[in-house]
Image (cartoon, helix red, strand yellow):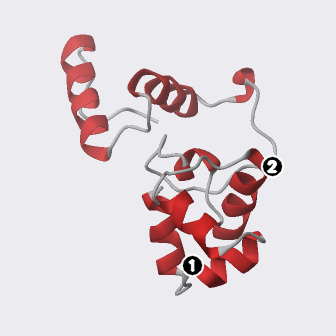
Amino acid sequence: MNRIRELRRARGLNQEALAKILRVNRSAVSKYENEEIPLNDELLGTLADYFSVSTDYLLGRVENPSPRREKEKAPSELSAEEALMLALTKLFGREPTEAELEKLYNVSKAVFNVPDKLEE
C-alpha cells in the first residue's frame, strides 16, 4: 500500500515508529506497505484515524484523502452537487479529477444548452 508509505514518510516516521503506533512489528508494516498482507478492519481504521484520511483513500479507491465523516448523510440530505459527485465516484470507481469534471461540465453545457454563467 503505497499510500501508507507516503503518509508515514510525510509524517517523518520510520517503519519502526509506525509499528509502535499500530502495535505490530516492523516487518508487518513493511508487508502492509508492499501489499504482501491485507489490512484488517481494525488496523485500517487506526491508520485512517491517525493520518486523518478516509479508509477509501488508504485503499486507493479515491484520490481525495479527506477525513472520514462522523455521520454520513442520507441520500435525501445530499445537495445536488454532493449527489452528482457521489454518482460520478460510483461511475468512475473513484473521485473524478478536476480535469474530468471540467470536461463533463463542457459536454453538459453543449448537450443541455447551458449558459456560461448560471444565474443564482
Q: In the picture provided, is 38 more to the left or to the right than 44?
A: left
Which of the 4 quarters of the picture holds residue 16? bottom right
Residue 33, percent from left and from top? 50, 61
- Please tell me whether mark 2 sits on a helix, a strand or a loop: loop
Taking depth in this image into account, of 22 and 99 the one nearest to the observer is: 22
Residue labelled with disc 1: 15
Q: Residue 70 carries which label?
A: 2
- The residue lying at 53 percent from left, 50 percent from top is 57
Q: Label 1: how many residues lie within 10 Å, few (<14), some (14-19) or many (20+)?
A: some
- The residue lying at 54 percent from left, 60 percent from top is 31
Residue 90, percent from left and from top? 49, 24
Q: Earlier in the sequence, mark 2 or mark 1?
A: 1
- The residue lying at 25 percent from left, 26 percent from top is 115
Q: In the picture provided, is 10 more to the left or to the right than 96?
A: right
Task: Give amino acid for label 1.
Answer: Gln
- Please tell me whether mark 1 sits on a helix, a strand or a loop: helix
Taking depth in this image into account, of 98 and 106 the one nearest to the observer is: 98
Taking depth in this image into account, of 90 and 11 the one nearest to the observer is: 11
Task: Give amino acid for label 2.
Answer: Glu
Which of the 4 quarters of the picture holds residue 97? top left
Q: Please tell me how many numbered marks the rendered image carries.
A: 2
Q: Label 2: how many residues lie within 10 Å, few (<14), some (14-19) or many (20+)?
A: few
Residue 19, percent from left and from top? 68, 75
- The residue lying at 75 percent from left, 61 percent from top is 46
Residue 77, percent from left and from top? 73, 28
Q: Is residue 69 above or below residue 4?
A: above
Q: Nearer the viewer, mark 2 or mark 1?
A: 1
